[in-house]
Image (tube, grey):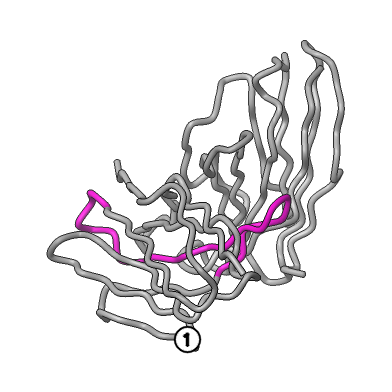
Amino acid sequence: GENVEQHPSTLSVQEGDSAVIKCTYSDSASNYFPWYKQELGKRPQLIIDIRSNVGEKKDQRIAVTLNKTAKHFSLHITETQPEDSAVYFCAASKVAGNQFYFGTGTSLTVIP
Amino acid sequence: DSGVTQTPKHLITATGQRVTLRCSPRSGDLSVYWYQQSLDQGLQFLIQYYNGEERAKGNILERFSAQQFPDLHSELNLSSLELGDSALYFCASSVDGQGIQYFGAGTRLSVL
């Protein structure tokens, strides 16, 4: 089955700096890669996703890049704000079946 | 609000007992997923249903079972509960089992 690894497990940045979280996956058939943000005690919420037919997607301060050859994808948050503090999960999935394989999460702290 | 409804929000029970968690997917969504999130842990996929039928099975214990009813709501049954079953249980839904998953607010289960 698919194996998704996520790094780092914790990340602290100063407000205004950028944050980068990286994930690797093992199954080359995976073709959908969402990122979820989970604030303490709340539900995971989708913040951005990318499909394997594109290499990069951007939404305001958030971007995701995908390297299919190397089987890794990354989340980039620019101009970080305290409200970006949360746990971020990456996931990989194949369109058929749509079982998500989640990474172990990155706890991001943005220091004011 | 994601549109996915989970009840109850909190459940406190004793070891050896049995509980049922309920999930109503977003209107129009045919697929339901169950996840377990233990303290400081990632999201562990348990099981997926699509239009009433089991589609994928993850790390679900034999003491656990689930089903999706004709009205598409789903129930997760946990029996012979152990202390280690204490966790947040999330339900998610998607339209066709091939895209974005929307998470409910979760049920926090405490086994004492």
Question: Does residue B111 appear anywhere in the picture?
Answer: yes
Q: Which element is circle 1 on?
A: strand
At which x and y percent is residue B107?
77, 43
**The disc numbered 1 marks a residue on which chain?**
A
Residue at x 45%, y 55% (from the top left corner): A11
**Image quadrant where residue B15 sits:** top right
Q: Position of residue A88 (x, y in %)?
A: 51, 58
Q: Nearer the viewer, residue A61 or A56?
A: A61
Which quadrant does the N terminus of chain B fall into?
bottom right
Of residues B111 and B68, the one nearer the viewer is B111
Residue B86 lies in the magenta-colored region: no
Determine whether, in the image, residue A75 is placed left or right of residue B79. left
| Residue B41 point in image, percent of width and height | 55, 38
Amino acid residing under circle 1: Asp
Question: What residue is drawn where x is 54% and y is 47%?
Answer: B48
Q: Is A35 or B61 nearer to us in this picture?
A: A35
Q: Report whether A9 appears left or right of B102.
A: left
In the rendered view, tell whether residue A19 sits above or below residue B88.
below
Q: Is B75 rendered above or below residue B26?
A: above
For this rendering, which residue is in front, A41 or A28? A41
Percent across and percent down for residue B11 are 85, 33
Residue placed at 87% from the left, 27% from the top?
A: B12
Instruction: Count neighbours of disc 1 (C-alpha within 10 A) and say few if under 14, some if 14 to 19, many if 20 or more.
Output: few
| Residue B30 seen from this side | no
Q: Residue furthest top?
A: B16
* B88 over A70 or under it: above or below: above
Quadrant (top left, top right, bottom left, bottom right) of the C terminus of chain B: top right
| Residue A30 within the magenta-colored segment of the rendering | yes
Q: What span is in magenta?
A: A25-46
